[in-house]
Image (cartoon, coloured by chain):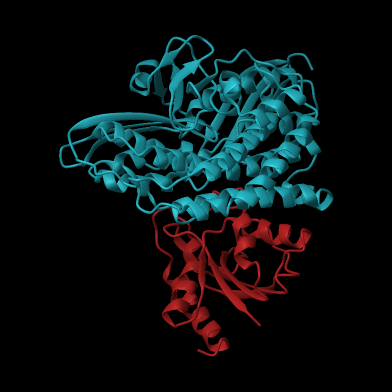
Amino acid sequence: MRTRIIGCGTEDRGDDAAGLRVAQRLRALGIDALDHPGDGLSLMETWQGADDVILIDAVITGGPPGEINSWNGHHADVVADQHRASSHAFGVAEAIKLARILHRLPPRLTLYGIEAAHFALGSAPSPEVDAAAERLARQLAAAEGA
Amino acid sequence: MNGKTRTIRVDTLARVEGEGAILIKLQGDRVTDVKLRIYEPPRFFEAFLRGRHYTEIADITARICGICPIAYQMSSIHAIERALGVQIDPAVRMLRRLFYCGEWIESHALHVYMLHAPDFLGYPDALEMAKDHRQIVEQALRLKKIGNRIVRVIGGREIHPISATVGGFSKVSTKRQLRELEDDLQWALDASIATVKLVAGFEFPDFEQDYEFVALSHPDEYPFNEGRLISNHGMNIDAVEYEDHFFEQHVKHSNSLHSVHRGHGSYLVGPLARFNLNFDKLPAPARQIAQEVGLVPPVKNPFRSIIVRAVELVFACAEALRIVREYAPPAHPQVPVEPRDGVGQAITEAPRGILYHRYAVDRNGLIVSAKIVPPTSQNQKRIEDDLREFAAQVSAWPLEEATWKCEQAVRNYDPCISCATHFLRVTIERT
């Protein structure tokens, strides 16, 4: 099974960089992981051909900052973020919904969300989100056998 | 309804790039106030370009927009080349045109299908549309992917491409690399022609305006990155004269400046302007399909811009095909550049309309001053003028429907708010 790990987010917009941080840590641990800016249409291209996709992004569920949750991408009720930190007309949530309609979801899609709270322009992720990114990277690396 | 005050309000405009809002106040059928509010924060690019070396400009300006980085790179590179007196290799010019084709295909496919078509087919968004019109969305994705591929082949990567430089390209494509695009482009050309037929069958509101259309014009080509700036009101100027004719004003309700044609007022840039002023320069397949669906200049109904964008898709695919067939790598991929004191201005045609850049450079090649006027800033006043006229026309409609139509009137312009700030919400108030 080919697993593809994709970390989504934007640098310099606070906790929105959560997914990117996880991908960076994974690469430092010797695991392949891709950065993705979160543009939904190209996201579908990015997971094309992979059997097992792990997608990591900042989320707002109302939990404490840095909380990690995971969902099955085939069933999760994803909604576009109200707080549009991204300026893309199509984000990650739209990509997942559109891929379901077009039957373009990878056979396995696992979503990891790191609870985010701060999105100020020019800021780095909060210590809680950084720590969560580190935890999640180690957990995924362990699962990948690194 | 007479004398009743109503407000049409959209707090977060959907299906636009960036963040903005609309507020329209109506008293009976009289529009008392219109505000297109762009509240995405300003980004100060012009300020932080100062003191940078001219060789960094293309990389920095590419970051202004994720949708049209090529336009920003091209306007900035051309302006610097004019400041430094650089003459590029003709094959580099050809490659730059192909680069631009890639961006237009990406951007227009996204807007025509995913952002604008749902308005005409009666869906709140492309996702709902995809449930009933899967093939349309598949077609859009494939077209967009081809545009992305061109940008990747020429620019090194899809997002914030890296190979375009002052003087040429740091790395140029081989003949074979471009030839490999041919099959995709032939499909894209056919798909674009089918797109024109599809969107020409949509229903359009009866709404025409007496616009001043402003676009580049070149003696032999449908314009991308070269030509004089002309209008249907008799203007014909070089980029050097742009600031004598156009000025920007700050308006309290927006983070984007409003650009105004001195002595004329608002004006329109983008597909309608290009098409109306350059119809005879379209390659045969684009001109023929336009005529076949009854689209002939002057097109004054902004809602029909979706057909014009589709015709421009045909143009971009046909032009790209021509280039990949005729291309031979440049003898001088990157001509040497000597820094000197100078000022350079350039205008290129971004997918949404003209993009003006001016730079002053010192003898060490450092940027002394920079000015950037994005297409959405130029259209912003015109969008408000359209809304003022259009809101009066739909003033008696149920509020929800009137609000939706007014949002559409904004989407006619495919506003790229992220670029213009230097974000979209619609409010109609009726008192």
Q: Quadrant of residue A59?
A: bottom right
In this rendering, would B218 be left or right of B107? Answer: left
- Residue B270, compared with residue A65, is above or below; it is above
Residue at the spot x=61%, y=34% of the render?
A: B315
Q: Nearer the viewer, residue B203 or B38?
A: B203
Q: Nearer the viewer, residue B213 or B169?
A: B169
Residue B158 appearing in the image: no
Q: Which quarter of the figure is the C terminus of chain B placed in?
A: top right
Q: Which chain is cyan?
A: B
Chain A colour?
red
Q: Nearer the viewer, residue B255 or B184?
A: B184
In this rendering, would A4 be left or right of B419? Answer: right
How many numbered marks are there?
0
Q: Which quarter of the figure is the N terminus of chain B placed in?
A: top right
Q: Nearer the viewer, residue B248 or B214?
A: B214
Query: In the image, residue B193 lies at what x, y percent?
Result: 72, 37
Q: Residue furthest bottom?
A: A145
Query: In the image, residue B203 lies at what x, y percent?
Result: 80, 28
